[in-house]
Image (cartoon, rainbow, N blue to C red):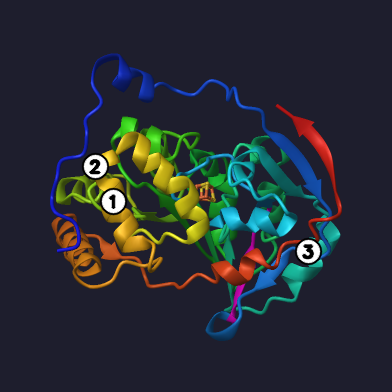
Amino acid sequence: MLFDDQPSPKLVGIARLAASSDLLEAKKQVEYLELETRRFIGRGSGRMRSIFTINPYRGCEFGCKYCYARYAHEFMELRDPELFERKIYAKRFHAPWFRDEVRRIKPGETIWLGTATDPYQPAERRFRITRRMLEAFEGERGLVLGITTKSDLVARDAELLARIGRKNAVSVHLTITTLDEALARLLEPRAPRPALRVAAVRKLTGAGVRVGVLAHPMMPLINDSEESIDAVCAAAAASGACSFSANPLFLKPCAQRVFFPFLEQHFPHLLRRYKERYQANAYLKGHYPEMIRERVQKALSRHALAAREAVEWPVDEQLELFGSPTLHRKVDRV
Ligand code: SF4
């Protein structure tokens, strides 16, 4: 066994209340910048060449401690990993160009929205780029469109997604790593609370949109207990989701620079073992992935859900496919 079972520390009293408080406004400054973009839709490479990818934003304000997309900012010489959460680049949207790109996609082909950063992060409330991109799909037919997000804001577009889904295969994949609000606030500090994400699943499925729930990443001895996996799976099933999956944490060196100090602060008893496992390899191998597969399988059978179809994400390629980072201007600051 890679990690011995040890209970995670429980927050109590005012600490727990504080950790589960609704976020009213981020105090840390965030800059929104507009990124000049010539091409909005990218392609995977190699075996993933057949998948198109779209990411309306670069950087992500949700600030998940395990996020591996942080290194995309290094391409802009933004080497402090925290800048990924504070300098958010919104692509300057040009509807006619985008529609031209969409029209070139043939029926039966697959498009993933949000492969590198969250398309429904707070910037979307202001700039509505994801919304405007989706509107371009309304006239299309025969496409396979998948969206991944950690935000309940996706429910805003429930009706639009249902309309697109009448002529295309549309599915939304909401990430819910835990139902424990205090733990979620630690791991995903500015992402919507798990209860809001569950409510979004309900609203989308109520509108007739297919929804899958993703419980990854599974972090050893943090959110990977059988009870926790089962609880998320049960909430997914009760909200009408059609699939559920969970994979072990993948921790690239850029993510380790944030995740290890996070462990040191909140889970110091786990730091040494995480370092031993992840410093040599970003993936966990051996018994652990097998154990997670078994726990997921048990939950799936208990709640009569299907496993999410295996889709490999062209993440690394996509990060290279953003528009030129040198052409941007600051558009807002909060
Ligand atoms: S929501 Fe996704 S892209 Fe955003 S910080 Fe979290 S893991 Fe990274």
Q: Position of residue 87 (x, y in %)?
A: 69, 41
| Residue 319's disc number | none
| Quadrant in the picture for residue 330 | top right
55 is within the stretch colored magenta? yes
- Tag nearer the camera, 3 or 1: 1
- Secondary structure at badge 2 equals helix
Asked whether 15 or 111 is in front, the reply is 15
Whether residue 245 appears in this view of the structure is: no
Q: Amino acid at mark 3?
A: Arg
Which residue corresponds to the image point at 54% horizontal and 39% vertical from the top-left?
153
How far separated are the C-alphas under marks 1 and 2?
Answer: 7 Å
How far separated are the C-alphas under marks 3 and 2?
Answer: 52 Å
Q: Quadrant of the C terminus?
A: top right
Which residue corresponds to the image point at 21% horizontal and 45% vertical from the top-left?
228
- Secondary structure at badge 1 equals helix
Q: Which residue is mark 2?
A: 269
- Secondary structure at badge 3 equals helix
Q: Which residue is mark 1?
A: 272
Q: Earlier in the sequence, mark 3 or mark 2?
A: 3
Q: Which residue is mark 3?
A: 99
Q: Position of residue 42 (x, y in %)?
A: 68, 70
**Left or right for 234, reference 275:** left
CB within 8 Å, label 3 to label 2: no
**Left or right for 3, reference 20:** left
Residue interval drawn in magenta: 49-56
Q: Position of residue 256 (x, y in %)?
A: 45, 53
Above/below status of 191 relative to 34? above
